[in-house]
Image: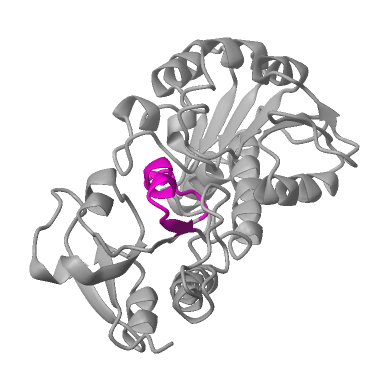
Amino acid sequence: MSATRIRVLVPGKINQRVIDRLAERFEVVRIESADPVPVSAQMQDVRAIAVSGRVPAALMDALPQLEIIANFGVGYDGVEVGHAAAKGITVSNTPDVLTEEVADTAIGLLLNTLRQLPQAEQWLRRGRWSREGAFPLSPLSLRGRTVGLYGLGRIGLAIAKRLEAFGVSIAYHTRSPREGLAYAYHPTLAGLAAAVDTLVVIVPGTEVTQRTVNDEVLSALGSNGVLINVGRGSTVDEPALIKALRTGVIAGAGLDVFENEPQVPEALMALPNVSLLPHVASASVATRNAMADLVADNIAAWFETGKALTPVPETPFTRRGA
């Protein structure tokens, strides 16, 4: 069917390529934010949303013709997906296209944290190498480490594959063991942390995972332990992490995500044993273009074929009358 008159709402900021792609075939309606819910005549016939951020239940309720929400990113915790499912609204995300980029970043962040490579670069750039001599030896190394993966979906498996090349031992924790893997499985997160000295977090931000990396888990990880988070900031209890880093409960941390982005606690930034990135795991032009294309293609496929290309598990719907 023709999609030339279909209205697509874009609340807040999103990659410009999404706007450009959608504008080729749809009427794009932009608003500054999903909160407060806008009220206008234009809203009544909006049938799709493209979003990089929040879609609260109230916004869905304000759009009586809404059929699909296309989320920019793998994680879709900003979308109240349970409410969408109850209303028969399909939600899609952008898996696979960013898997390799995020996995690459996770390994880079791990090496940065262990070997203090950003600090070594600053030592050189500030002229300290020539004035003061060699950069101090890094107290930590990847050699001989045991790495635990909290989450073993597409990205977790890609990280594990890369870690194999470094010759480290690998273990994991998920809700249930995955068949056909040689990695050691641990039924609890605390059990995994106790068995490893490096914990890589790559789980979505949900109520179930919120602040699950807590005092108990950090204590189990131990004084030689290193935490890497490329999942969601809400998974880590930040005050507990700051305390653990200050007191030597764990040795270091590398974080690409934070609880209240873009606000990062000053106490965290002041610590010498952390490596911090501004949520850039998938932030290359090539990967973000692929994500943008998949957002637009999910909406186009919905109205052309009646199915989204990459619906999330909670909304495996087909379009009525397709």
Q: What stretch is highlighted in magenta?
A: 74-92
Q: In this view, does 40 lie to the left or right of 146?
A: left
- Magenta stretch: includes residue 87: yes
Q: Nearer the viewer, residue 189 or 314?
A: 314
Please give left or right for residue 268 compared with residue 10 in the image: right
Q: Which of 174 and 201 is in front in this view?
A: 174
**Coordinates of residue 302 in the picture (x, y in percent):** 48, 73
Residue 101 vs 190, above or below: the answer is below
Image quadrant for the N terminus? bottom left
25 in the magenta segment: no
Whether residue 96 sits left or right of residue 124 in the image: it is: right
> Which residue is at the front of the view, 267 or 89?
89
Q: Residue at x 63, y 49 (%)?
A: 108
Task: Name the residue furthest front.
Answer: 321
On screen, residue 202 versus residue 32, left or right, reads right
Residue 115 position, x and y percent, is: 64, 39
Q: Is residue 36 above or below residue 248?
A: below
- Residue 28: x and y in percent read 25, 77
Image position of 54 with respect to 311: above or below: above
Q: Which residue is drawn at 14% across and 71% down?
A: 42
Looking at the rendered structure, the number of numbered marks drawn on it comes to 0
